[in-house]
Amino acid sequence: MDAKTNWAKKFAGTTTAIVTPFESDGKVDYKALKNLIEYNISGGVSGIVVMGTTGESPTLDHEEHQKVIKFVIDEVKKRVNVIAGTGSNATSEAIKLTEFAKKAGADAALLMNPYYNKPTQQGQYLHFKAVADSTKIPILIYNIQGRTGVNLETPTLLRLINDCENIVGVKEASGNIEQIKSVIEVAPENFCVLSGDDKLTLDVIKAGGDGIISVASNIVPDRISKMTKAALEGKIKEAEEMNKELIPLYGACFYETNPLPIKFMLAQKGMCKEIYRLPMCEMMPESKKRVLEVMKQTKLL
């Protein structure tokens, strides 16, 4: 791995955390997935995260997980970055998945905090270091306490940055803008800091961050990409105007647990079926009604 790479630039912009479409029988709908990939690339995104939270990764077995990662890499054909979700609450599993992503040709791996176990800061440090030491693929840490029950504190992240040359970025979904600012302040200049929350993207970029791993860009890749690009170019007023129009959509993406709302929206546009794997399920009728109202408000219907 080239130590001189500016990871902040390589992974900057808008990266879509892509959904995993399913057929009526519950199998992965690869035709719809291919179309979603093309839709996002044509919309100007700089990357795609496959098998993340939005991709319903916990409901796919390891064989399916790997097949979807390989499919996305093969379809993208190096046109944009492909970041593979390879995290697990078992370090040994995370190592195996990450090594697969490297062999398959992913540009980076995305690893969330180990979930359910509630490891200490030292436990998280040892987990991420063990994965990083096992491979040469660039790694982005996915800090999302709301899903995993633990927060990777800034001093722990800094230890990992200093001790592991292939830990090159973080998707910060803590929801704590002060923590995100502290990461930006202490991290090396070439370290990539991405927002993990659409509604905070502009604030993160204003603070010196590098972009977003986005849920909303599944359905409006062009609008999110333009807004993020304008902000990164210092055209803050222009970015603020575009962002203002998107705020209702950001909220609608979380009327119920992600990815239920965004998949529902895509289904309304005929881009995938409204099918999930249990324990994920369709939204309640009142939530669907609210989402449809936002889609009309934001000119998606």
Image: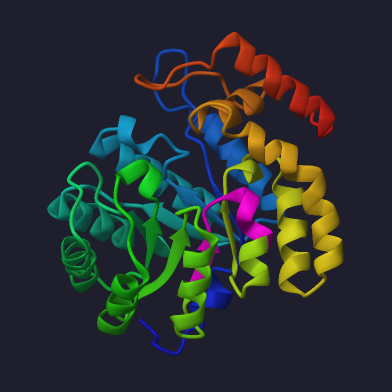
Q: Nearer the viewer, residue 20 or 254?
A: 254
82 displayed left or right of 144: right
Residue 200 counted in the magenta span:
yes
Q: Is residue 251 visible?
A: yes
275 displayed left or right of 243: left
Point out the residue furthest to the bottom here: 4
Residue 58: image quadrant is top left
Q: Is residue 284 above or below residue 79?
A: above
148 displayed left or right of 30: left
Q: Is residue 134 above or below residue 248?
A: below
Residue 186 location in percent, x, y? 45, 82
Residue 133: image quadrant is bottom left
Q: Residue at x 31, y 81 (%)?
A: 165
Residue 162 location in percent, x, y? 30, 84
Image quarter where the N terminus lies is bottom left
Q: Nearer the viewer, residue 124 or 226?
A: 124
Magenta segment boundaries in residue numbering: 192-202
Q: How many tags in the picture?
A: 0
Q: Nearer the viewer, residue 81 or 187?
A: 187
Q: Nearer the viewer, residue 89 or 49?
A: 89
Q: Is residue 110 above or below residue 89?
A: below
Residue 48 location in percent, x, y? 53, 53
Residue 198 counted in the magenta span:
yes
Q: Residue at x 53, y 42 (%)?
A: 18
Q: Is residue 294 above or below residue 47?
A: above
Q: Residue at x 44, y 21 (%)?
A: 276
Q: Residue at x 77, y 22 (%)?
A: 293
Residue 59 location in percent, x, y? 32, 30
Point out the residue furthest to the top here: 285
